[in-house]
Amino acid sequence: MKKLANDLVRNKAIYFMVLPVVLYYFIFKYLPMYGSIIAFKDFSIAKGVWGSPWVGIDNFKDFFDSIYFWRVLRNTLLLSFYQLLFGFPAPIILAILLNEIRLKLFKNVVQTVVYLPHFVSLIVICGLILDFTNRDGIISTMIEFFGGERTTLLGDAANFRFIYVFSSIWQELGWSSIIFLAALSGINPELYEAARVDGAGRFRQMWSITLPGLVPIIMILLILRIGGLMDIGFEKIILLYNPNTYETADIISSFVYRKGLAEGQDYSFTSAVGLFQAGINFVLLISANWFSRRVSGNRLW
């Protein structure tokens, strides 16, 4: 205890700097966990958390027996899996390609262009998507030009997943590549010089030096992505979907929003659904960390 007190005094400036972050997580991440108790109650605002009667796991049973259970679970997993399958490698490839560009001006222009969508408001992005994909939008015009038929693309449930995943990759591609570019800057340049002396070409250098240098950060980010596989954001879904696309667009988060706020105030039921989602994420995170540790030796803990 005395050692800890001495360390606090000696490094008080550092601890003071980290204090806002600790307070943020404590107030907005840990304190709200108290509210999860209503998932096991028939919650009433008038009665309060402790005054509401216990119902055990009835809210979870209602969700599992719901006709929407398999639909929202399937959609959540598929959208997250597609984003992981296509969206996770994209910034890695972009970072490697940018790293190979020797013309600095061209590199800076490309980086600026691909970073910009991240800083555009999500509402504006979704507005552009809706405009581009409606019957009179530019995409429908191009489809008609090549012999297709004009249609409102987001009016068809079959198109929703492709549009959602592709637009998400476009929006976050540049920003997500920054961490990989930072990792590339940490690779020892002497390794490339030695490879050139041995006759290795650009592709061989990428395969034997660049990619292995990125493996540790790739595995860490992959673990985090898998751990959040069920935690796909509902804001973009809410802004893009409509009753015609519920079959492929409705996910757990949007279902919770609709049942908890838009269509009613069944707080206990929606808390149970959210707790189920968090529990699956926790299991996925533990499993991904264990698998990565066994296979590659890289892990979060």
Image (cartoon, rainbow, N blue to C red):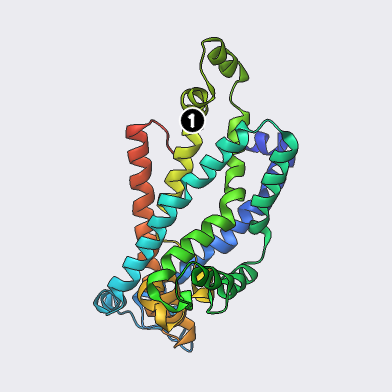
For this orientation, the residue located farthest to the top is 197
- Density class for disc 1 (Cα within 10 Å; few <14, some 14-19, many ≥20) is some
On the rendered structure, is 285 left or right of 241? left
Quadrant of the rendered structure where residue 98 is? top right
On the rendered structure, is 271 left or right of 110? left
Image quarter where the C terminus lies is: top left
Front position in the image: 270 or 67: 67
Percent across and percent down for residue 237 are 49, 71
Can residue 246 be seen at all in this image of the molecule? yes
Quadrant of the rendered structure where residue 110 is? top right
Can residue 2 be seen at all in this image of the molecule? no
Residue at image location 71% in from the left, 40% down from the top:
106
45 lies above or below 231: below
* Residue receiving disc 1: 211
Amino acid carrying label 1: it is Leu
Percent across and percent down for residue 281 are 38, 57
Front position in the image: 44 or 295: 295
**Label 1: which secondary element:** helix
Percent across and percent down for residue 1 are 58, 37
On the rendered structure, is 11 left or right of 126? right
Residue at image location 47% in from the left, 78% down from the top:
151
Percent across and percent down for residue 74 are 32, 66
Quadrant of the rendered structure where residue 43 is? bottom left
Front position in the image: 43 or 220: 220
User: Total label count?
Assistant: 1
Front position in the image: 11 or 97: 97
